[in-house]
Amino acid sequence: MRFIRDIFREKAAAGKPVISFEFFPPKTAEGDVALLTKTIPELKRLRPDFCSVTYGAGGSTRDKTLDIVDRIQREHGIPAMAHLTCVNATQEEIHSVLEEARRRGIQNILALRGDPPGGQGEFHKTDGGFEFSYQLVEHIRQMNGFSIGTAGFPEGHIACTGGKRVDWDRLKAKVDCGADFVITQLFFDNRDYFEFRDYMRAAGMTVPIQPGIIPILGAAQIRRFTQMCGARLTPQIEARLTALGDNDEAVREFGIECATAQCRELLAAGVEGIHFYTLNKAHSITRILQNLGIGDA
Ligand SMILES: Cc1cc2nc3c(=O)[nH]c(=O)nc-3n(C[C@H](O)[C@H](O)[C@H](O)COP(=O)(O)OP(=O)(O)OC[C@H]3O[C@@H](n4cnc5c(N)ncnc54)[C@H](O)[C@@H]3O)c2cc1C
């Protein structure tokens, strides 16, 4: 398969954005079948450049994440990336996950610290583990043979008490440890992304900063997600969601409209690509890319 850093390079040379889709490992065997035989084939028509698969809280999906990445590559021929976190794992355990990834031909890793188990409270390093993602980036870089992505936060990381610029300086440091590209946390106001990108460029960071976009699928769900990760819904979005109430179909249509407008502005501003948080659903992503005239939708 291919290194994602090379994909970014080639698409930039062709003047085209890198389009990627993120999935989470389903909890059931039926969910696996639906993802691999229905959702991904549907989304494959849009010609994604790569896909990525999350790593469950507390490292709970260790094998499942690698299995799905492996199947996306072998059964669908799409380059794929495994997310990997430092939660509940010693350095040796993390090393063995990476060796297993390598054995399966997985060459792309999104190196993350992860959230505290349960998503709440302070993160505590496992004895013999890593405390911050930059240490994981360094470890993977020393192993050779992987293209490494890292997470960036246009509004600053939720737990960074020093403010967003302190968090952004730390991002610069983790990229300097060997990351090839950044994928951002979801956000809804492009001004947050532009301020973040301009700051990182002024700090001398040259790797791609791929914005992460989520189509709103439900009002309660997006309020929960944004609260968990510290992203802000704009007042306009909040007002529309309130007005639409529990009309789920209308909320989903609004989500498509919002994400389309957001992506259109980002692409016009020359972003290197868009990473879509698909939530394992094809409909909204297909409509958004149709609206943007990307892929074979
Ligand atoms: C694109 C994307 C994908 C994600 N996928 C997953 C997933 O699959 N599974 C999952 O569990 N979570 C995932 N997350 C969530 C992520 O794990 C959490 O946001 C986590 O809290 C931070 O991870 P990080 O890699 O940014 O951590 P770090 O880079 O380690 O940063 C964590 C905190 O520590 C601070 N910090 C960093 N370096 C230092 C330092 N040297 N000294 C002091 N403080 C420092 C930062 O400012 C920040 O507040 C994802 C996030 C994004 C944006």
Image: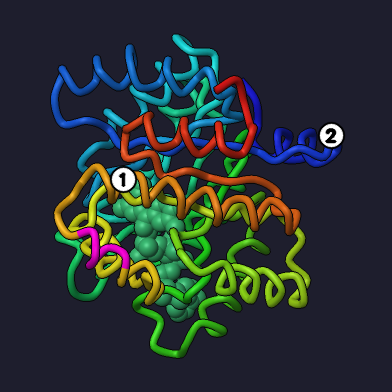
- Crowding around mark 2 (Cα neighbors within 10 Å: few <14, some 14 to 19, many 20+) is few
Asked if the stretch drawn in magenta spans residue 241, the answer is yes
Res. 93 in view: no
Question: Residue at label 1?
Answer: 252
Task: Please give left or right for residue 26 compared with residue 230 in the image.
Answer: left
Nearest the camera: 283 or 186?
283
The quadrant where residue 112 appears: bottom left
Q: Residue at 66%, 38% (x, y): give it.
A: 18
Quadrant for the C terminus in the image: top right
The quadrant where residue 17 appears: top right
Res. 250 in view: yes
3D distance between C-alphas at marks 1 and 2 = 33 Å
Asked if the stretch drawn in magenta spans residue 117, the answer is no
Cβ of mark 1 under 8 A from ligand 1: no
Helix, strand or loop at label 2? It is loop
Which range is magenta?
240-244
- Crowding around mark 1 (Cα neighbors within 10 Å: few <14, some 14 to 19, many 20+) is some
Question: Residue at label 2?
Answer: 14
The quadrant where residue 171 appears: bottom right
Q: Nearer the viewer, mark 1 or mark 2?
A: 1
- How many callouts does the rendering have? 2
For ligand 1, give the image quadrant: bottom left
